[in-house]
Amino acid sequence: MKRQTVFLVVVLLFFSIPVVAPFGVARGGAPQGVPGGAGIDGEAVYRSHCLVCHSLAPPPKAAPPIKGLAKHYREAFASREAGVAYMKAFMKKPDASKAICHKEAIERFGLMPAMTLPDDELQAVAAWIWDQFDPAMTGGH
Ligand code: HEC
């Protein structure tokens, strides 16, 4: 029974690696002994730490929906790497003058509180948000 659980976890980890691994590799490997954030599921981080304020798609809860953020970041940054890095920095230290989302969003929802998650979790969730871009989404959010 227990052995089966361990096996399942290993299998799940194995399948989640290719999603995050390219980042770890591109950034030259492991800071702090964590293999480049491999194995961290960005969506799981989102569910535990962000979903309380950020819905995935409209209508919004207490913050702009994720798909809208992905759209703004895609418009503002040419590369996934640059967008993800900027998002990570913003989450650590939100600053109204550096926000990519519209000023009206901050007026409406207030400024986001700083996130105190480990770097590799921020990396995983930022990459996941970037990937939530939905080309079918037009207009505001
Ligand atoms: C307590 C509510 C709250 C939580 C929890 C929260 N956010 Fe936010 N977030 C906001 C609000 C409000 C804004 C809009 C104002 C702003 O940009 O600061 C925002 C904006 C953002 C932005 C846009 C920043 C920009 O450049 O304009 C990103 C990206 C983001 N959040 C990601 C996350 C992620 C990832 C998490 C979880 C790790 C998270 N947020 C958790 C409230 C929250």
Image (cartoon, rainbow, N blue to C red):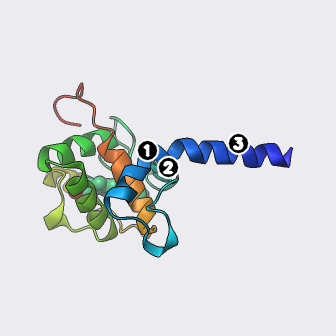
Q: Front-most of 1 and 30?
A: 30
Ligand 1's quadrant is bottom left
Instruction: Please identify the quadrant where the C terminus is shown.
Output: top left
Instruction: Please identify the quadrant where the N terminus is shown.
Output: top right
The extreme bottom residue here reads: 32
User: Considering the numbered disc 3 on the image, is that residue within a helix, a strand or a loop?
Assistant: helix
Q: Front-most of 60 and 127?
A: 127
Q: In the drawing, what numbered circle is on residue 2?
A: none
**What residue is rendered at 30% in x and 39% in y?**
67
User: Considering the numbered disc 1 on the image, is that residue within a helix, a strand or a loop?
Assistant: helix
Mark with earlier residue (2, 1): 1
Q: Is residue 32 above or below residue 3?
A: below
Q: Is residue 134 above or below residue 15?
A: above
Q: Which residue is mark 1?
A: 19
Where does residue 65 sit, x and y in percent of width and height? 32, 42
Residue 89 falls in which quadrant of the image?
bottom left
User: Considering the numbered disc 2 on the image, is that residue within a helix, a strand or a loop?
Assistant: loop
Q: Is residue 88 left or right of residue 105?
A: right
**What residue is rendered at 32% in x and 62% in y?**
27
**What residue is rendered at 43% in x and 44% in y?**
19
Q: Is residue 86 left or right of residue 21?
A: left
Q: Amino acid at mark 2?
A: Asp
Q: Which residue is mark 3?
A: 8
